[in-house]
Amino acid sequence: MITGEADITLFQLLEKIKKGTFVDPILKGTSPGLLDEIPFPDYSLVEFDTYSRVLDNSRCVSILSSRGCPYNCVFCNSTIMGAGKTVRYRSPENISSRNP
């Protein structure tokens, strides 16, 4: 299991599994720097026909433009998993450059 952000740690975990050196059952996720540096998913792999969300008569998926939350709700998974309260955003230019 990876706690926190898994963008970097997931790849490290997969490398350890491939090499047979995986030991820790719980890993602390490493927070990436700027969100703009995290690549967007490869939308060519998404089967949009299987999605039920529709916007302007087209099926769609969400793009997450931020991470973190300044609140501390007891029911929130981010609070439970220790994600912290730091709020970070992708730049508007980074988001508007996407056209899946």
Image: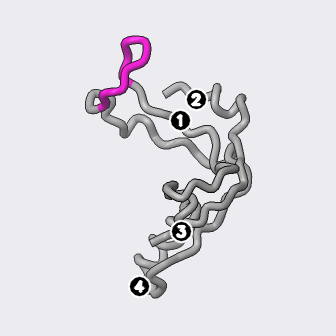
Q: Earlier in the sequence, mark 1 or mark 2?
A: 1
Above/below status of 79 relative to 25: above
Q: Nearer the viewer, mark 3 or mark 1?
A: 3
User: Can you tell which mark lies on residue 20?
Assistant: 4
Q: Earlier in the sequence, mark 4 or mark 2?
A: 4
Instruction: Give the amino acid at mark 3.
Output: Thr
Q: Residue furthest left?
A: 50
Q: Nearer the viewer, mark 1 or mark 4?
A: 1
Q: Residues within 10 Å of mark 4 (few under 14, many from 20)?
A: few
> Pointers 1 and 4 in contact (CB under 8 A)?
no
User: Can you tell which mark lies on residue 93?
Assistant: none
Q: Earlier in the sequence, mark 3 or mark 1?
A: 3
Q: Earlier in the sequence, mark 4 or mark 3?
A: 3
Q: Report helix, strand or loop for mark 2.
A: loop
Q: Report helix, strand or loop for mark 4.
A: loop
User: Can you tell which mark lies on residue 3?
Assistant: 3
- Locate residue 46, reporting x and y percent: 36, 37
Instruction: Give the amino acid at mark 1.
Output: Ile
Asked whether 19 or 34 is in front, the reply is 34
Q: In the shown orientation, is residue 7 left or right of residue 54?
A: right
Q: Report helix, strand or loop for mark 3.
A: strand
The CA span between labels 3 and 1 is 22 Å
Instruction: Give the amino acid at mark 2.
Output: Arg
User: Can you tell which mark lies on residue 63?
Assistant: 1
> Pointers 4 and 3 in contact (CB under 8 A)?
no
Q: Earlier in the sequence, mark 1 or mark 4?
A: 4
> Pointers 1 and 2 in contact (CB under 8 A)?
yes
The CA span between labels 1 and 2 is 9 Å
Which image quadrant for residue 9?
A: bottom right
Residue at the image point whose x is 72% and y is 54% from the top: 86
Query: Mark 2 highlights which residue?
Result: 98
The magenta-colored residue range is 51-59
